[in-house]
Amino acid sequence: MCGITGFWDISRQISTDYLPVIVQQMSKSLIHRGPDDGGSWVDGEVGIALGHRRLSIVDLSPQGHQPMISSNGRYVIVFNGEVYNFPELRKQLQSLGYSFCGHSDTEVMLSAICEWGVLEATKRFNGMFAFAVWDSQERVLHLGRDRIGEKPLYYGWCGHTFIFASELKAFKVHPDFQPEINRDALALLLRFSYIPAPYSIYQGIYKLPPATLLSWNGTTIHPQPVPYWSAKIAAESGVAYPFTGSENEAIVHLEELLKDAIRMRMLADVPLGAFLSGGIDSSTIVALMQSQSQQPVKTFSIGFHEQDYNEAEYAKSVAQHLGTDHRSLYVTSDEAMAVIPKLPSLYDEPFSDPSQVPTFLISQLARNHVTVSLSGDGGDELFAGYKRYFLASSIWQKIGWIPQTVRHSTAKALEGVSAQTWNRGFEPINTILPAKLNFGDKLHKLASILAVSHPDIMYADLVSHLQEPEKVVIDSSQLSTVFSDGNLWASLPNFTERMMYLDLISYLPGDILVKVDRATMGVSLEGRIPFLDHRVVEFAWQIPLSMKIRGNQGKWLLRQVLYKYVPKELIERPKMGFGIPIGAWLRGPLRDYAEDLLDESRLRREGYFHPQPIRQKWDEHQNGDRNWQHHLWVILMFQAWLAENSAGN
């Protein structure tokens, strides 16, 4: 795992002597991603510079040093990630006459590119990666990113200079970078709690979309990424040509495929372990790891003293059954809150999934013992694990048959009564419930659902925290996303499968994988995700929905694999999620912190938000009239990021 950066000064305005200084400074800003080694390569005649920071995982020797030049001298590469099938590719290339000095995957990637070209070689890579390859013969710079989006890569312009990096930190070091906040992207942040690709928080700076290559020869102003793999095609093809074997055959095939994906991801020359929550996904990964290990696998879990957020005891039971070398860390609310001031620097771009806090804490725990950790991310999207899949389908079945005019008028009537009034009306019911429910919030959410004309639009509303962020962000407009562009939707007849597909190309890469990458890299830990092996992804789409969902429970097929290793009674329990009690903290220990960032005069001075709707939500949340935790948290994370950065006005 590493950090990469570089630039191409096509105007040649930067002196040749200054090129290596700039790229080395840019690389240094990414030292957390690669503390073990660093390097740079410059071609002053062309004006191109490549920089690299290395976290040594495979081939710890100098033979793995980057930037690396191909044996024929044509290509130079900087690479972040792992290509897990490099031993097989190495053997194939050796049969074609190639020889190798070391045993790193980077050297194999270069030889593959020499043999098959960048596009065809990338199609053969099984792994997580972001890379830049300079072709000195054709004078073309190639940027590439893995199929699902595990590893980040930003690119864009600084004046006449084309620039790229693993994180935005490196851009800020370049002397020509003049940051300007993209208000339209800020509106997307308020809607989704993350900024989806291809946008970034800065004008003119973009995220390379997953499964694409961008090749630039220095002539076009706006080079366009080209896909080399398609989640849309994988989903449509899998549903059109499903797995036709028996349930037992499907169980065996999935087990063997997962074992191979995990075996490949257990290759490392440094200590390795796994995150273990005790849920279906992480327990499956750990069980299949332990079945292939001669030693107890090192496993890690985070516990909270708030019982509603604590999974550590479940993880401990699974670890004891499997015989892993397990470590749990119980974290107090003060220890968790101590992470919050670090988030703007850690995540580099505004990001507001509250589970970013425990994800960082478990990464920190694991890094004290290992350098690589596997996780169970991706299982929910591939095997129908989220509650919202069942909720959305159930809601649409109940309301979809009602004429839209009737639904629309009902929605108007529900919204015509304020949420506070609804809450007061239901107050007698709250007195007999174990926990207070904000019925007004739920009725207004129902109203927004009733008004939609199509189930996919309803789902977009369900995964949106703020429906009309353009009314909060000053001078912003709506950008196109996968939810607004029907051309990006897969042609899947089943609503549940369409939801899973939308999550696979939006929420997973935009939220989950960003969270994992920044948290792990922030402590120089490499995170690996076996479920996102593209062979597993493609097979998951071939599995009929009837083998994923049984009754009101998802992940049926995955559970059958797990039950071979872990008793059912250790696993079956309500899904908890991986979060923290943000709503309560905002009314208590975080109140002063938030009040400072949400101060009305401050908001007016900075000029990004209309203060009135924010202050109204803050007051309603403090009074207990509404639960605005997610809406407020995203504003707070932007405000904290803004205070950390000098990008402002």
Image (cartoon, grey):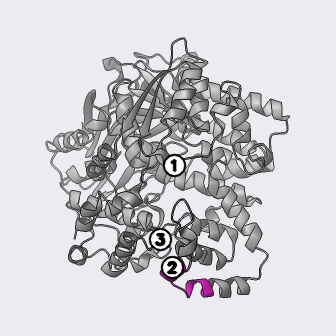
Residue that carries the numbered disc 1 in the rendered image: 210
N-term-proximal mark, 2 vs 1:
1
Q: Please state which of the two labelled residues, at mark 1 or mark 3, is closer to the viewer.
A: 3
Q: Quadrant of residue 487?
A: bottom right
Q: Which mark is residue 466?
A: 3
User: What whole-number distance in Å separates the C-alpha atoms at marks 3 and 2?
Assistant: 24 Å
The amino acid type, in three-letter code, at marker 3 is Leu
Q: Secondary structure at mark 1?
A: loop
- Which x, y percent locates residue 575? 59, 46
The amino acid type, in three-letter code, at marker 2 is Arg
Asked if the residue under mark 2 is in contact with the one under mark 3, i.e. CB atoms within 8 Å, the reply is no
Q: Which mark is residue 424?
A: 2
Residue shown at 44%/61% (left/top)? 193
- Which x, y percent locates residue 511? 47, 52
Q: Quadrant of residue 21?
A: top left
Residue shown at 29%/56% (left/top)? 589
The amino acid type, in three-letter code, at marker 1 is Pro
Q: Is residue 596 magenta?
A: no
